[in-house]
Image (spheres, grey):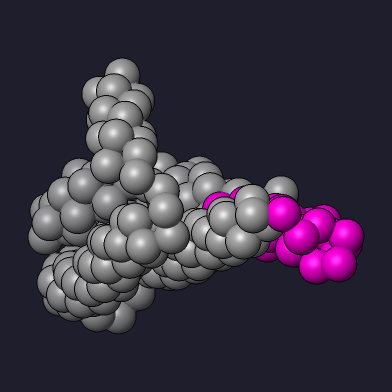
């Protein structure tokens, strides 16, 4: 699904290239280059993953509703055997398991989208800073080459150094804010995972431990690859 954040990785790379070129002329900008290099990311991809989790949550909700509607068609008068009560309990457990997983998928989706927005905001700050530094560097080069002369031109490099220092502080603040969002979301996902584990156990899923280990191993393998 297309979103405004799909250009985030291109903006991040453009910011790094611009800032690196500017730092050749403005040495005080190298700390900005370092922060931009370590914050290369793809907010659009993170956003898409979040939307996939939300779509999964919607599908799980539909599955729970379908199960509830199907079981509701079996009237108590039409089925009065000894196995009716265990069946009702089993259907209830299955519905609850779906709802628990739906809640977990919703938390993961919302958290991923929140992280993508925070990262995109950081990328925008990076791009703005890099563009201004590149403009300052171009002006300094023009002055040094004698293409442009203006009163106070000798102060241009000094002013560029001051801006680079301020820009580094702004980038550090934006990076810190994005880290707070990411860490908070990680804690929320961890809590939701624990809640799902307990909810599955309470609703008759005795294999949740094995499933969790298998899912974790698969995720780790995918991460390593």
Q: Is residue 98 magenta?
A: no
In the depicted view, which residue is nearer to us: 126 or 95?
95
Residue sitting at x 26%, y 72%: 184
Q: Main secondary structure of the magenta part?
A: helix
Q: Is residue 65 left or right of residue 31?
A: right
Instruction: Tell me where the magenta segment starts and ends, as one range.
Output: 53-81
Across and down, in percent, residue 43 comes to 47, 53
Across and down, in percent, residue 88 comes to 64, 61
Q: Is residue 1 left or right of residue 19?
A: right
Q: Is residue 68 magenta?
A: yes
The answer to whether 54 is drawn above or below residue 170 in the figure is above
In the depicted view, which residue is nearer to us: 151 or 36?
36
In the depicted view, which residue is nearer to us: 186 or 73?
73
Quadrant holding the C terminus: top left
Choose top left, top right, bottom left or bottom right for residue 87.
Answer: bottom right
Across and down, in percent, residue 169 comes to 16, 75
The answer to whether 78 is drawn above or below residue 176 in the figure is above
Q: Is residue 1 visible?
A: yes
Choose top left, top right, bottom left or bottom right for residue 149.
Answer: bottom left
Residue sitting at x 12%, y 56%: 31
The answer to whether 98 is drawn above or below residue 179 in the figure is above
Residue sitting at x 27%, y 67%: 191
């Amino acid at each position: 699904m297309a979103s405004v954040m799909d250009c985030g990785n291109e903006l991040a790379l453009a910011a790094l290239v611009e800032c690196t070129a500017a730092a050749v002329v403005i040495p005080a900008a190298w700390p900005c280059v370092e922060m931009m290099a370590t914050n290369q990311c793809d907010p659009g991809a993170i956003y898409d993953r979040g939307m996939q989790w939300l779509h999964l949550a919607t599908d799980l909700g539909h599955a729970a509703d379908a199960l509830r509607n199907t079981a509701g068609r079996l009237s108590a008068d039409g089925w009065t055997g000894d196995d009716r009560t265990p069946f009702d309990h089993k259907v209830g457990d299955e519905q609850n398991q779906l709802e628990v997983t739906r809640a977990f998928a919703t938390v993961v989706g919302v958290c991923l989208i929140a992280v993508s927005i925070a990262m995109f905001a950081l990328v925008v700050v990076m791009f703005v800073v890099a563009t201004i530094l590149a403009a300052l560097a171009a002006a300094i080069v023009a002055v040094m080459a004698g293409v442009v002369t203006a009163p106070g031109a000798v102060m241009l490099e000094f002013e560029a150094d001051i801006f680079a220092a301020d820009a580094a502080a702004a980038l550090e603040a934006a990076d810190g804010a994005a880290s707070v969002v990411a860490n908070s979301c990680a804690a929320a996902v961890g809590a939701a995972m624990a809640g799902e584990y307990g909810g599955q156990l309470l609703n008759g899923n005795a294999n949740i431990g094995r499933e969790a280990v298998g899912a974790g191993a698969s995720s780790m393998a995918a991460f390593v690859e």
